[in-house]
Amino acid sequence: MQYTLLILLLPLLSFIILGLVDNKWSPKVAGTIGTVVLGIITALSYYAAWEYFTMHQVAGVYEKVIPFNVEWLRFTELLHINLGILLDPISVMMLVVITTVSFMVNIYSLGYMVNEKGFERYYAFLSLFTFSMLGLVIATNIFQMYIFWELVGVSSYLLIGFYYTKPSAVAAAKKAFIVTRFADLFFLIGILILSFYTKTFDFGLLTSGDPKVFAGAAGATFMGFSVLSWAMAGIFIGGAGKSAMFPLQIWLPDAMEGPTPVSALIHAATMVVAGVFLVARLFPVYITYTPEVLHGIAYVGAFTSLFAAVIACVQTDIKRVLAFSTISQIGFMMVALGVSGYGEHEGLGYMASMFHLFTHAMFKALLFLGAGSVIHAVHSNEMNHMGGLRKYMPITNWTFLIACLAIAGIPPFSGFFSKDEILSACYEYSPYMGVTMTFIAGLTAFYMFRLYFNIFWGKEHKHEHTPHESPFAMAFPLIFLATVTVFAGWIPFGHFVTSDRANYDIHLDMTVASISVIVAVVSILLAMVMYRKESEAPKKLAVTFSGLHKAASHRFYIDEVYLFITKKIIFNNISRPLAWFDRHIIDATMDGFANTTQWVSVKIKGFQSGQVQQYAYVFLLGTLVITLLVLFI
Amino acid sequence: MGDLLTNFLSGPVPVDAYLGLSLIMFFAGVYGFLSRKSLLMILISIELMLNAADINFVVFNRYLYPGHLEGFYFTLFTIAIAACETAVAIAIIINIYRNLSSVEVGNLDQMKN
């Protein structure tokens, strides 16, 4: 399967070409190149997935295929970094997800970004992002993953800050970069600890289950926890940063400053699930050696999920609602991983998490692209500038509705199946976890339909010009993704991705399924009553729970807490003294050297007069001094 | 006092007297080299220093290795070379004079800056 290398190299090539050419070619050509390259690698990924899932199964277990692996950097015998391609069920699944969504976003952008300044730059960055994300999922070792992880962070930064003349976009890009980079510091520390004790970066060795690999870490503890726990927790923090888990979620809502297709690609479908992918990739290590960290992941995921769902209920910017819904859904995936065990039925959570990742990528990309279509039509992100759009935008309306039904967990749409598996896994873990997650699922249904009814129903807002349906380039991805969303639930996902890579038949747990469907339907009806027609109910509720409403609209003041900590505490107590030390001690020392040298040179400049007689005089004096020294000392 | 004077006048010339003479000549040359502004005077001072060295050659040859002639020949060579050197130096000085209408060392700062 050597051709998988092409999947990685083609987007890189397209990035280099588009980046070098910049605006010398017309936007049409640049867009076509980007889209065609994506089309090719999408086809290649589908072929790779087909070949992998049909041909690489040995005795019912999918084998790991490494079609390509080279030693890239060699420091010592033990410390060397490889670059390669690792194909196993999750990476192949991610290939399909990333290329599909990226391809759709490329097509969509042809319509959405047309007439934007910097169209070529946009396509170059999209290619760069696709390249980095693909490199991340097929990494054979944790260090390669880290390299691409950072590349993903950079391309995300570049794309959020695409409208670089807008201060808020620049601030959002910086915030995203700094917050994720801060989390990546822990990731790096985790990698270093882990590889120090195991003497390897290789995923194959780390997840092989061979106890010899971890023998070096046996008995080594630090502050009551084993060093492995610390390492794996550090790695999870890195993943939490990218996946916007509490308390590192602050960057994702702001990242909506980027162009909407970018939000669909990066901040809904692909990059933000990198953390989930990371935990899934190292899952055997988590479950065997550090189950306590895995429990922590479950609780962090559940809390984030609840937290974000509550905020999503009161936001008025439609992209922000979707952003918080993304955070909440990633929380679901994390919970599913956290509650999972290893093996056939025990590994249900793992399978459910990956399944939800797959379906969520599709319907959340669809939601974002639909939101982009709406924004394109009414030129505003604010909910109360919309309303009654269903008449003008039938395609957007129907596809958006499908996506909302999917995320709310209504059968037979894809979200129902994956969410049901997650809920079953949660109920098996503990009833409390199950009930909590069911409640959050209800909240999800409520805020999604609040969004839906506010956009497409409700009171019609006066528009400057009549909203119109989007062009074909934008409508096609919507229809395609909606089709996937309708049918993806019927994929026998357990036959492809499971924790031990063996086949597993999904059973629908009827009790859990019916409970979650009832909760979802009730929530939808509630949203319908409140928002379908203009009513006083939302306002009354807001007044009744004014404290909660206000706190949630301000995202529970987490941003303010961060600002307080950074600006008031860290800046004042650490940064300023450091800056003073830098300016007055370190810089002053260096300046002192320079000033002294200059002073001395000014003083002795006169010596070099060019007058031979003067030189001879000095020479004579010198001779005399030396003579006297030789004579008398 | 009388004894000393008699010895001084009747005996051979002591080596100290020769060395004293060459010392005075040499430092007169050094002083001239350092203090004179005219290139010609500087050149003359250099000649003075060379001649002081020549006297030393002759004297040391006479007192240390009587019967040998190396010191004398060396002195002859030095005189010849000094003559050549003077010729070259004067040629240079004449050129300088033609260009600058002056042979003062203080004025020779065209190469500076």
Image (cartoon, coloured by chain):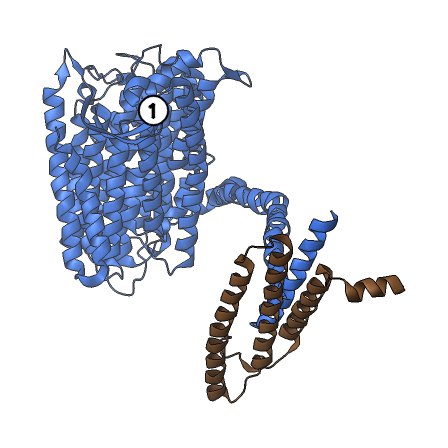
Chain colours: A blue, B brown
Left or right relative to A420: residue A543 = right
Q: Which x, y percent locates residue B76? A: 51, 66
Q: How many marks?
A: 1
Q: Which x, y percent locates residue A54? A: 10, 21
- Chain letter for the residue marked with disc 1 in the picture: A
Q: Residues within 10 Å of mark 1 (few under 14, many from 20)?
A: many
Outermost residue toward the front in this view: B10
Q: Nearer the viewer, residue B9 or A495?
A: B9
- Above or below, comparing residue B49 to residue A493 in the picture: below
Residue drawn at x 57%, y 42% as measured from the top left? A565
The quarter holding residue A599 reads bottom right
Task: Give the quarter of the figure containing the N terminus of chain A.
Answer: top left
- Above or below, comparing residue A323 to residue A437 in the picture: below
Residue drawn at x 11%, y 27% as measured from the top left? A50
Secondary-structure class at tag 1: loop
Q: Nearer the viewer, residue A187 or A398?
A: A187
Q: Which residue is mark 1?
A: A201
Identify residue type, mark 1.
Answer: Phe
Residue drawn at x 42%, y 40% as measured from the top left? A181
Left or right relative to A620: residue A552 = left
The answer to whether residue A522 is visible is no
Outermost residue toward the right in this view: B1
Q: Which x, y percent locates residue A462? A: 31, 62
Q: Nearer the viewer, residue A547 or A621?
A: A621
- Above or below, comparing residue A77 to residue A310 in the picture: above
The quarter holding residue A264 reads top left
Q: Nearer the viewer, residue A279 or A15?
A: A15
Residue drawn at x 30%, y 56% as measured from the top left? A460
Q: Which x, y percent locates residue A356? A: 27, 28
The answer to whether residue A330 is visible is yes
